[in-house]
Image (tube, rainbow, N blue to C red):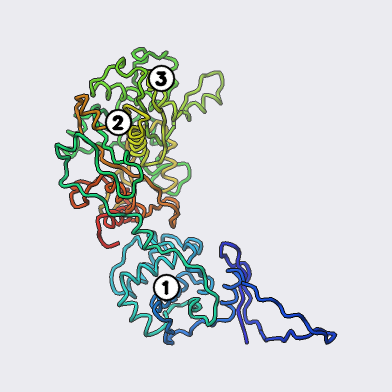
Amino acid sequence: MTAQVALLDAEGTVLVRMKDLLVRAVALDGNADGAPTPALAPTSAPALVRDVERSATTAAPESGTPAPDAGPDDLRGRTERYLTGVLAGTTKMDAAEIDPTVPLERYGIDSLMITRLNAELEERIGEQLSKTLFFEYQTVEELVEYFVEEHAERLQELTARTAPEASGPQPAPDATDAPDAPDAPDAPDASAAGAAASPAAPVRNGRFLAPGDLTGTAEPAANGSDDHRGEAIAVIGLSGRYPMADDLGEFWENLAEGRDCVTEVPRERWDHERFFDADASRAGGTYGKWGGFLSDVDKFDPLFFPIMPREAELMDPQERLFLQTSWHVLEDAGYRRKDLRERQVGVFVGVMYGEYQFHGALDALRGGRAVTNSSYASIANRVSHLLDLHGPSMAVDTMCSSSLTALHLACESLRRGESDLAIAGGVNVSVHPYKYVFLSQGGYLSTDGRCRSFGAGGSGYVPGEGVGAVLLKPLARAVEDGDHIYGVVLGEALNHGGKTNGYTVPNPRAQERVIAAAWGRAGVEPGSVSYVEAHGTGTSLGDPIEITGLRRAFGGVG
């Protein structure tokens, strides 16, 4: 008989493929001299060898022929072959090269190809599919689970009538179709994993804490092993500066009046006309010249703290701004520096860009000058040093989530008893054109200075500056001490999207899990949530992913 053999590496990538081999059985009951040959002991072939054997002895079904019956899991097997055929037709690959368990990005899937696949499957299924489908499910195996669960009836029609009508060669039948094939290891159940990640959570009635809740803690999460994770944290101090708002009073007025606080890059920052070019493809330039900017970021009273003026001049403006804001948040909470001296007060700050040192790079090249500094750690450590605070002091960079991560770490530090109080916040200032050039290079910026989050026509985001901080304390202690309580943090959660079909692409299923984990810790019923603040990037890909994650978390269709 003829056969096809493939040699794969440990990750399942095809290294060598041989087709149209002539195979015949040869009796091994003797050698050239006529002496008997000892029988070979049967051995278990490795998984890769079994896969090669299976592909070498199994023929793909002809297009248009009825799909074979494979018992109870027949629909899954037929759906896998069907989707593999569609993928093969779109990518112009040999279907036999597509491993259902391998991430689709291995086969060169990009955003353009994903758009075509979505359109192709929508036409075949006969209804609209999620535009984030290929970002939620990263392998054919995961796609099969989704389609069997959501579109079983239509798949029965499509796969029972004929094999998939794809332009590429059709895939070999599932391993279960091969007679006497060795059992393959069981694949993890994606749906079971998702269910385990979203356990039933205790429920709290209403949006706000009842009076009795102020004497204790929130219910611990069903999946939490430590009761302290359910303890509520009080916000007892607030301070911040934002574009066209030098304090929180002006900030709330801007929000209430719907004021547009986006402007072109101020001249005192840099001459943006030297770098601006509407042609987004020009290297070294930027097609964005808009943003939200703080006023007077170069103004600072060093002797108040006290810091030597020359030292202050070389400090990153972000360091100076967060120091000022930390002072103001203590004032807002009614605490004096001597009240906190030598206490376990933590400082946690989120920060993403350190551009001030780029000015120092030029000074270093010129020689004979002191250079500017941008140290993330120093932003937090400066506060702890000047206020004589002895709790943890750290800066964190998790990109856009840096300030929320800082808040989470502060709450955890308080719950562990590592800190008595904690200053948590973030700072972001643009003081060099590098940031805009870099963002343009990646295609992240809006082309017209407008960020249309969850709206039509969004082309990217508009950078915005800001600095803010909160003073945190365990709720029970804050009530006991008579602190003014602005609000209560009942629960937070942190995770990563893991591997997706693109480094900058979020994972809506991971977003669903982290949201569910947060209100599971808080003991909050999803139906009682009346306000959600989302990360709307204003792009045709980012916004649908955000919406999909939220919809799934609130119990909608994925």
Q: Is residue 475 shown left or right of residue 102?
A: left
The image quadrant that residue 213 belongs to is: top left
Pointer 3 or 1: first along the chain: 1
Residue positioned 60% across, 76% down in the render:
53
Q: Residues within 10 Å of mark 2 (few under 14, many from 20)?
A: many
Pick whichever, 101 or 179, lies toward us: 179
Indicate the secondary structure of the residue bearing disc 3.
helix
The quarter of the image holding the C terminus is bottom left
Please state which amino acid type lies under the numbered disc 3.
His
Indicate the secondary structure of the residue bearing disc 2.
strand
Q: In this view, which residue lies farthest toward the right?
A: 33
Indicate the secondary structure of the residue bearing disc 1.
helix
Give the Cα separation between the discs numbered 2 and 1. Answer: 49 Å
Q: Is residue 77 shown left or right of residue 220?
A: right
Q: Nearer the viewer, mark 3 or mark 1?
A: 3
Disc 1 designates what residue? 83
Pick whichever, 517 or 466, lies toward us: 517
Residue positioned 40% across, 51% down in the render:
497
Disc 2 designates what residue? 468
Q: Is residue 496 above or below residue 316?
A: below
Please state which amino acid type lies under the numbered disc 2.
Gly
Pointer 2 or 3: first along the chain: 3
Disc 3 designates what residue? 385
